[in-house]
Image: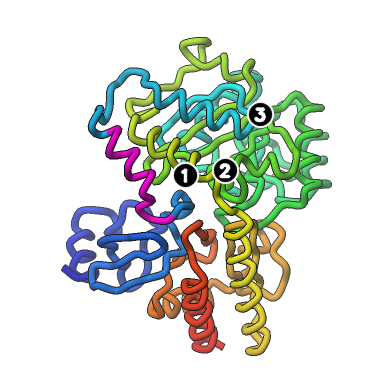
Amino acid sequence: MSSESLYKESREIFPGGVNSPVRFYEPYPRFISSASGSRIYDADGREYVDHCLAFGPLILGHGNQKVRKALQSQMERGILFGAPSEGEIQLGKAIREAIPSIEMMRFTNSGTEATMHALRLARHHTGRDLILKVSGGFHGAHDMSLSAAPYKPDTDPSRYSTLEVAFNDIPGLETVFRNLGQRIAAFITEPVLGNVGVVPPDPEFLKASRELTSDSGSILIFDEVITGFRSSYGGYQNMVGVKPDMTTLGKIIGGGLPVGMFGGRRDIMEDVAPSGTFYQQGTFSGSPLAMAAGYATLQELKNTDYAGISSYVTKFGDEIVDFAGQKNMDIQFNRSGTMFTVFFNNREITDGAAALRSRTDLYTRFFNTILNNGVFIPKSQFEACFTSSVHTLDDLGKVVEASRNSLKSIS
């Protein structure tokens, strides 16, 4: 069946014809039938260089042999037990060795679950009510993340459970903690914004986050669902030398299977049942298949050339920025290691508000044209693009050519 016919059928079963809104685009999404390495293939037989990579988990590309072998081996031994298995310990030890701030952890089934429980636990541990996040930071589809209000000194914070401050705004962060520090249970931030497009941090902002939360007795949570093992073996926190109290992970640590994790200081995590009174559970948490795929992925990543993947991104960025300049087009190419976003904007993107001022109409045209030229990227201006260890110079040539054709069509 074609993507169009599959979409017509899908609309009768799922809202909007999809099981996640980020997969929908006009006139209908391409339905993927198979994938291998850096390429995906749709139901109509078209091939694409994939720079979406399932929104981040597949840093080794599609169908990595060692991950497949690990999954096949685990399937022969059992799929789900409802009881502990050794695979949980293997993956947990690998994560703890790579990210020393995570002294204890609990596996979940998604990044949304991980951040939700981390914030619940922070409130439980501190006995405080307020959550602080950054504008444009996304921490899953739950109320504590989605129902946030910008902090204003003249606004009664009791009306809200979650407040926002601008990313990279150190004076703004200092103001919030000066006025409300004793009520803030946790400050949660992605060390690199990834769900408003890629926005790298000012390292001083992350250091200020650590100092202010420590001084106020609040818990600092780094949401590394996207950034964990993405730019180096470990967390982004290792690269900047800032140690949070808690960390959330997902995506890469599941090797392509559903997974999440929240963890951190031992004294906080020992509040979690059955050690403590904070209740959290999940039927599929610590799924043997996800543990096997995640552990195999991390073992592969120990020997991965992260610098090589990053150089691919740099080369692509240099090419597209140079070509856009020749066409007198205003674009910003934001990157962080193996992640990147093309913003249609004439100003530097340093926070969520700046990202939201980008020309989404131009990005939509860019997406549609580059898709028709054989490159698959997220359909939204406000999603990150990802690169894998199996992307090649041949892929880079195709992506550069497709990008030039796309920019030509909208210049």
Amino acid bearing label 2 = Gly
- In the rendered image, residue 250, in percent from the top left (x then y), is placed at 49, 40
Figure quadrant of the N terminus: bottom left
Q: Are marks 1 and 2 in contact (CB under 8 Å)?
A: yes
Give the quarter of the image for residue 11. Answer: bottom left
Amino acid bearing label 1 = Lys
Q: CA distance from mark 1 to mark 2?
A: 8 Å
Residue under numbered circle 3? 101
Q: Is residue 179 visible?
A: no
**Span colored in magenta:** 61-74
Q: Residue at x 25, y 28 (%)?
A: 78
Residue 13 numbered tag: none
N-terminal label among 3 and 2: 3
- In the rendered image, residue 239, in percent from the top left (x then y), is placed at 71, 44
Q: CA distance from mark 3 to mark 2?
A: 13 Å
- In the rendered image, residue 389, in percent from the top left (x then y), is placed at 50, 57
Q: Residue at x 23, y 65 (%)?
A: 7
Residue under numbered circle 1? 251
Dot 2 falls on a residue whose secondary structure is: loop
Q: Colour mode?
A: rainbow
Q: Are marks 3 and 2 in contact (CB under 8 Å)?
A: no
Dot 3 falls on a residue whose secondary structure is: loop
Amino acid bearing label 3 = Ser
Give the quarter of the image for residue 326. Answer: bottom right
- In the rendered image, residue 85, in percent from the top left (x then y), is placed at 36, 21
Residue under numbered circle 2? 228
Q: CA distance from mark 1 to mark 3?
A: 19 Å
Using residue 219 as the reference point, say whether residue 51 is left or right of it: left
Q: Residue at x 61, y 27 (%)?
A: 102
Neighbor class of circle 1 (other Cα within 10 Å; few <14, some 14-19, many 20+) is many
Q: Residue at x 60, y 53 (%)?
A: 306
On screen, residue 32 above or below 119: below
